[in-house]
């Protein structure tokens, strides 16, 4: 299992960040590896989604899970075909908010054999770079969608 966390400050109200993160129909613009996002079911605070993720030369993997709106952020949990737990925490501060994204996952089955030969630190650095890209995409989305 890998746990990686990144944080970024935004000069926008927490409600704006929460609205962008909670818009599951636009989720693909925040996830650099997402090829497709399908909404399977939805209610006021939850959505069942299927995200098809590009794994480079290993092809693509469809991951089904649930996105939940929480008081202090958003959480996405998937268990099949791989375990992923992504937690977005939005912490208000004067004039804006801090956003922390924490990802806990296992190596996808398609990549497990190769991962044994790659140091854990390298995998965590790669995941960290992906989280930085997600936070940059969030900044872009917030700039494009003024309140």
Image (tube, grey):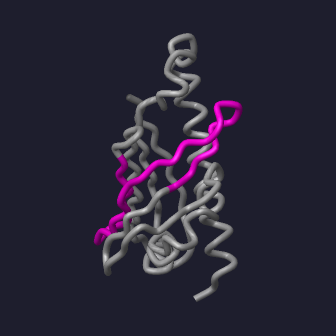
User: Is 145 above or below relative to 78?
Assistant: below
Left-right relation of 124 to 84: right
Front in this rendered view, residue 39 or 142: 39
Can you give x and y, in whole percent of width and height, for residue 22 in the image? 45, 72
Left-right relation of 26 to 105: right
Can you give x and y, in whole percent of width and height, for residue 69 in the image? 34, 70
The N terminus is located in which quarter? top left
Residue 47 sits inside the magenta stretch: no
User: Is 42 above or below relative to 84?
Assistant: below
> What is the quadrant of residue 129 in the picture?
top right
Front in this rendered view, residue 142 or 2: 2
Query: At 55% from the left edge and 62% from the top edge, which residue is drawn?
Result: 37
Left-right relation of 37 to 78: right
Query: At 63% from the left edge and 37% from the top edge, which residue is drawn?
Result: 55
Predominant secondary structure, magenta span: strand
Can you give x and y, in whole percent of width and height, for residue 108 in the image? 48, 31
> What is the quadrant of residue 76 in the picture?
bottom left
User: Is 139 above or below relative to 35?
Assistant: below
Front in this rendered view, residue 93 or 110: 110
Q: How many marks?
A: 0
Can you give x and y, in whole percent of width and height, for residue 57 in the image? 70, 31
Front in this rendered view, residue 49 or 44: 49
Query: At 41% from the left edge and 31% from the top edge, which residue is drawn?
Result: 106
User: Is 104 above or below relative to 28?
Assistant: above
Q: Residue furthest bottom?
A: 147
Find the magenta span and give its range: 51-78
Residue 69 sits inside the magenta stretch: yes
């Amino acid at each position: 299992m890998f746990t990686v966390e990144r944080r970024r400050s935004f000069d926008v109200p927490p409600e704006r960040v929460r609205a962008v993160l909670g818009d599951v129909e636009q989720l693909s613009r925040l996830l650099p590896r997402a090829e497709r996002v399908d909404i399977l079911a939805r209610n006021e605070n939850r959505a069942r989604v299927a995200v098809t993720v590009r794994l480079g030369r290993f092809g693509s993997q469809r991951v089904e899970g649930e996105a939940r709106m929480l008081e202090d952020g958003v959480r996405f949990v998937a268990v099949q075909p791989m375990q992923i737990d992504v937690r977005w925490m939005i912490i208000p501060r004067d004039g804006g908010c801090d956003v922390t994204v924490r990802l806990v996952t296992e190596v996808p089955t398609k990549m497990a054999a190769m991962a044994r030969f790659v140091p854990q630190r390298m995998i965590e650095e790669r995941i960290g770079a992906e989280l930085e890209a997600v936070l940059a995409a969030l900044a872009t989305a917030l700039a494009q969608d003024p309140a």
